[in-house]
Image: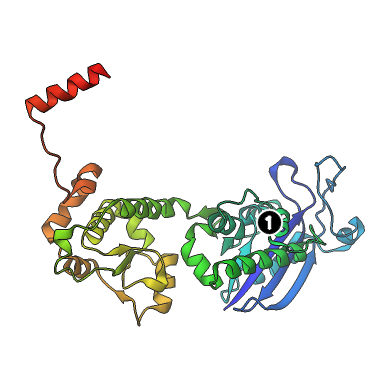
């Protein structure tokens, strides 16, 4: 599997529609060694909104005449389509949502079929793994990382810098690029039928479950004889989204019996797939076998010692009931204690 880092420059974005003047890319192998680097110039057939030194407009990587001599988007479309729809590459861009929309905008302008591909955003990866940084722009991030930025705004060079940013994050975290993606699935975008979808909303369920898991403490009474102490569990994002109450209930049981809810594939012991394979499921399946056991829902209930009839009722429960399930009920205060508490409140 190779990695494709790409960047797009536009002559202008008048009317909210980007007129592409170049698409640059860097193709790298699994170790992020560069295989190929290329800048494809495009005649935008539109005015260039160049910088006037006041922050407005764009900086060009080439003389305008070079773009004017190039073929237009319709002529370069087959090349772009073959490049971006190659099933053997994983695609990256910095603030890639903008580049995707430039492509779709040009498809509309030239009345061409839309592109269909998936891509990851290094800007989102950077926000996730470098939470203390206030930088978002590619140039500023490179400066913070000590990466030279001599040829900014030339598409292939910006693609090269995007690769360097990804490489630097891997070095800092001491992991490979695939592991970065496993731990930050909200950097994933899909493009289909002219629609761009970021999977952040699905990931938000994961964040809620992870936050809840930190809240639930192991129950000493349930730890005795528990077979899942320190075992790591995870579910497909489709399950977390479509059956969030059941997922919350499962996390409750896992934590109270000493288990761990985790998205770190390298540490997983059990994984529950569900419905159409999501990115997380595909990533788990690619390494399943060894330390990860793929389980069906009924198998997981058996492993966790959950009564099936109780589990089937969970979908009708309130969120509060699920969160408090199994926790000791608060003791009722005596009348004297209540009066004492009221007096203290009044005095305060």
Instruction: Pick whichever, 343 or 34, lies toward us.
Output: 343
In this rendering, the count of numbered labels is 1
Residue at far left of view = 335
Tell me residue 299's x, y (percent): 20, 70
x, y (%) of residue 189?
54, 58
**Which residue is more in the foreground, 83 or 322?**
322
**For residue 285, which quarter of the picture?**
bottom left
Q: Say how the picture is coloured.
A: rainbow
Left or right side of 179 for 305? left
Secondary structure beneath dot 1 equals helix
The residue shown at (67%, 78%) is: 33
From the image, tell me which residue sits under label 1. Answer: 141
**In which image quadrant can residue 138 be found?**
bottom right
Instruction: Classify the position of the N terminus by image quarter.
Output: bottom right
Residue 114 seen anywhere in this rendered image of the structure: no
Residue at the image point whose x is 14% and y is 47% from the top: 328
Quadrant for residue 305, please give it.
bottom left
Q: Position of residue 284 (x, y in %)?
A: 40, 72
Picture quarter with the C terminus: top left
In this picture, residue 305 sits left or right of residue 279: left
Place of residue 127 in the rendered image (x, y in percent of width and height, measured from the top left): 57, 54
* 330 lies left or right of 211: left
**Residue that appears at 35% across and 71% down:** 268
Q: Is residue 190 above or below residue 324?
A: below
Local crowd at mark 1 within 10 Å, few (<14), some, or many (≥20)? some
């Amino acid at each position: 599997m190779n990695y494709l880092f790409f960047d797009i420059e536009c002559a202008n974005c008048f009317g909210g529609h980007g007129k592409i003047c170049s698409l640059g890319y860097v193709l790298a192998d699994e170790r992020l060694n560069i295989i190929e680097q290329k800048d494809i110039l495009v005649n935008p057939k539109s005015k260039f909104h160049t910088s006037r030194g006041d922050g407005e407009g764009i900086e060009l990587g080439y003389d305008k005449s070079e773009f004017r001599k190039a073929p237009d988007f319709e002529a370069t479309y087959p090349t772009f389509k073959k490049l971006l729809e190659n099933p053997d590459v994983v695609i990256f861009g910095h603030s890639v949502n903008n580049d995707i929309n430039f492509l779709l905008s040009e498809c509309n302008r030239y009345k061409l079929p839309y592109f269909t591909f998936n891509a990851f955003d290094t800007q989102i990866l950077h926000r996730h793994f470098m939470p203390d940084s206030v930088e978002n722009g590619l140039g500023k991030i490179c400066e913070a990382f000590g990466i030279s930025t001599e040829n900014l705004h030339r598409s292939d060079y910006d693609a090269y810098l995007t690769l360097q940013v990804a490489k630097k994050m891997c070095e800092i975290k001491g992991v490979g690029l695939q592991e970065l993606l496993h731990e930050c699935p909200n950097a994933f975008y899909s493009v289909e039928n002219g629609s761009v979808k970021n999977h952040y909303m699905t990931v938000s369920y994961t964040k809620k479950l992870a936050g809840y898991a930190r809240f639930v403490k192991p129950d000493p009474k349930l730890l005795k004889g528990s077979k899942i102490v320190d075992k790591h569990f995870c579910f497909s994002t489709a399950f977390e989204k479509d059956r969030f109450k059941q997922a919350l209930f499962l996390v409750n049981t896992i934590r109270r019996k000493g288990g761990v809810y985790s998205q770190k594939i390298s540490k997983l012991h059990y994984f529950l797939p569900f419905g159409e394979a999501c990115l997380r499921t595909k990533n788990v399946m690619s390494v399943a076998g060894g330390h990860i056991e793929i389980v069906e829902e009924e198998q997981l209930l058996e492993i966790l010692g959950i009564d099936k009839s109780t589990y089937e009722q969970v979908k009708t429960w309130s969120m509060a009931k699920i969160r408090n399930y199994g926790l000791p009920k608060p003791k009722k205060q005596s009348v004297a204690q209540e009066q004492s508490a009221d007096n203290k409140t009044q005095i305060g």
